[in-house]
Amino acid sequence: MKTKRTVIIALLVLMAALFAAFNVNTASAGDNNDDKPWICHPVNGRGELGNGWNLINPDKESSHIDESLFPDGEYWKHMSNDGLRHDQYALSNGPSGTCPGAEIPAWTPPTYPPFNPEPCTEYRLEKSTSTFNANTGLWSDWVDWPGSGPLDWNELPAAMTGHHGGDHEEDGDRHFAYVVVDSRPNTSEECNPPEADPPTVEWTAHIPVCGVDTYAETGLRTFFKVIRENNAWVNVFDRSEPITREVFDDQPDCPLPPVANASVTCVSTGPDYVAWQLTNTGEVAIVSPASLAPGASAVIESERGVEGIVTILVAFANESSGSFTGSGEGCFFTPPVTTVTTTTAAPTTTAAPTTVSPTTTTAEDVPIPQPESPEPLNPESPPVPQEAQVQGTLPVTGTSTWVVVGLGASAIVLGVSLMMALSWRKQEEDELV
């Protein structure tokens, strides 16, 4: 009886142990197994996690990891194509676990070698390729495509770039591009312009300054260039730049100052003459009493003054002035008596007539004394020329105009003589009576 009881108890304990073991295995194989870590499985490319891994449920452990070799042996069952990654436990557990490694960039087109041909240059091109690595997200360097060889000079392919094999955006995706392997100048006439015309220099006209023998001269230097126009090379203006140079003039031209001069000339005759001709004989314009350019003339009215002479004050444009006198024979006039004070010589008179016998002498027979012609005031004076030009102040010259005074004196003498004759005749008549 006791033996049976023992056997029953042992069977119950065994059944409980089996049930517990079954529950444990079921929990470890389920999706929510928190006892075993999840597995990082390597892939070619970015994978589910974006860094080359897929995250595997622990119930797949046996198909990825050989636990008998873990952790010191080659316990993994899968390896990436680049040989850098293999099956391993996740760094953190659960469906949100993480795997080692940085994120792999997404696929992008390759960067093609640039081809920027320069004008008047010949090129030789050759095909090269670049391959995409999905495990790194990078393209390889461009390398020559075996057997393609360079093209002829200036030969261009149908396409410069394009796809050259492999799955698009997958590991091993390959693209091609033609790259320059040689170049040389184009020797044609249109690519070899002639030299431009040499620069020209134009100096500014210099005005010498008296006493200055060194000065800076300014000028302009003009440059030219050649351009292709209507299938020909043409020289055209390029640019200009100012230039200076120091010039030494051991004998600079010093222009003489212009001469200021004038002359006054008699232009007509008459007793009441009041006009003279003023001529600008210098190189400076006259501004007063009239505006006269060099060489020009004008008739100037003068004030009444000493007969036969006039003095005219002249102002020039260079602020200088001068006194110019002119005279001429016949250029005279009679000034008013009230304005002229003169000194005259006593008139020449005739002697009284001799008394004659009244019997033989009648009033009609009495001679009337005639006045002699007055002598000239200055008989020794030489004749004055008809026309004279004088610079500066001239002495007073000309013919005397005292004729009227002489005639008056003669009339007085004649009157006195007549009165004396009449008186003598009256006396003779009284004596006869």
Image: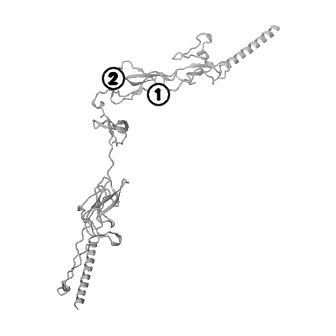
Instruction: Work out whether 358 lies above or below 292.
Output: below
Disc sitting over residue 2 in the figure: none
Number of disc labels: 2
Quadrant in which residue 381 is drawn: bottom left
For the view shown, which residue lies furthest in the left direction?
360
Q: Amino acid at mark 2?
A: Leu
Q: Earlier in the sequence, mark 1 or mark 2?
A: 1
Point 40% across, 22% down: residue: 128
- SS type, badge 2: loop
For the view shown, which residue lies furthest in the top direction?
3
Residue 401 lies, in percent from the top left, at: 27, 69
Quadrant in which residue 390 is drawn: bottom left
Q: Is residue 1 visible?
A: no
Q: CA distance from mark 1 to mark 2?
A: 25 Å
Residue 316 lies, in percent from the top left, at: 35, 55
Q: Nearer the viewer, residue 142 or 319?
A: 319
The residue carrying mark 2 is 151
Point 52% across, 26% down: residue: 106
Q: Nearer the viewer, residue 295 or 159?
A: 295
Point 18% across, 87% down: residue: 359
The residue carrying mark 1 is 109
Binning the other alpha carbons within 10 Å of mark 1 as few (below 14), some (14 to 19) or many (20 upward) gives: few
For the view shown, which residue lies furthest in the right direction?
2
Quadrant in which residue 408 is drawn: bottom left
Q: Nearer the viewer, mark 1 or mark 2?
A: 2
Position of the N terminus, as image quadrant, is top right
Q: Amino acid at mark 1?
A: Pro
Residue 421 lies, in percent from the top left, at: 24, 82
- SS type, badge 1: loop
Left or right side of 214 for 134: right
Q: Nearer the viewer, residue 307 or 81?
A: 307
